[in-house]
Amino acid sequence: MNPVLLIPARMASARLPNKPLADIAGIPMIVRVWRQAMAAGLGPVVVAAGEPEIVAAVEAAGGRAVLTDPDLPSGSDRIWAALGQIETRHDVIVNLQGDLPALDPAQLRAVVAALDKSGADIATLAAPIDNDADKTNPAVVKAVVAWDASGALGRALYFTRATAPTGAGALFHHVGLYAYRREALESFVALPPSPLELREKLEQLRALEAGMTIAVAKVNEAPLSVDTPDDLERARKLLS
């Protein structure tokens, strides 16, 4: 396998404007994410930027970024557009969000390993939910997974913002990292948004509705995702 890691980033954010350039202990958030991705040692890392300011910040830190159309509808569309601007020998494309400044590089290695081991079209991660508030929080996306006998690798059955499944047993927080086989990403971005995707506002449901397979690797905890000013303050305290 020959991965490339792509980080979609754009300045427009309803809850946290100019989020990629938010200062965290003197370093722009997008630069912190790029550094964590580089530390995984999987392959080249490229930021798929919606604006020139993001490109400038990444390049100033010694990284690589390409400019993509700011009006692209999703992160998947943005990484596909970026892939067209770089050389094309990579057969695995890892999509990691630009708002995970404390991401453990081991989780990037885990998602690529899950893709390799499972033979699925796409791989992602899930972590056990360990508090009651997250179980009912619609901002915490739940992964409904058919786990194998080891309990470490499974197949995604559904993703939802609701509390699911019901009854006794663990619930799992979906970690929004993806590893795509190149042909799977190409097929995915060519599909129109699906009914369940539009209903749940979860892009990965488009793949499931189209019959694509998504492998899920279990990790211990979900990384801090910076979506709001409060999240940003938490990140600053964590990384100061």
Image (cartoon, helix red, strand yellow):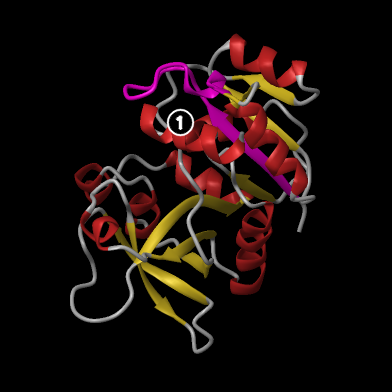
Classify mark 1: helix, strand or loop: helix
Residues in magenta, as a range: 3-23
Residue 233 occupies which quadrant of the picture?
A: top left
Query: Picture coordinates of residue 215 (x, y %)?
Result: 50, 67
Query: Picture coordinates of residue 60 (x, y %)?
Result: 76, 15
Residue 233, placed above or below residue 37: above
Is residue 14 covered in magenta? Answer: yes
Look at 34% across and 39% down and name the residue there.
Answer: 192
Which residue bears the numbered disc 1?
232
Amino acid type, callout 1 = Leu
Residue 144 occupies which quadrant of the picture?
A: bottom left
Query: Picture coordinates of residue 154 (x, y %)?
Result: 48, 75
Say which of 172 and 194 sits in front: 172
Query: Picture coordinates of residue 13 (x, y %)?
Result: 38, 22
Look at 49% across and 82% down and name the residue there.
Answer: 151
How many residues crowd around disc 1 within 10 Å: few (fewer than 14), some, or many (20 or more)?
A: many
Say which of 14 and 186 sits in front: 14
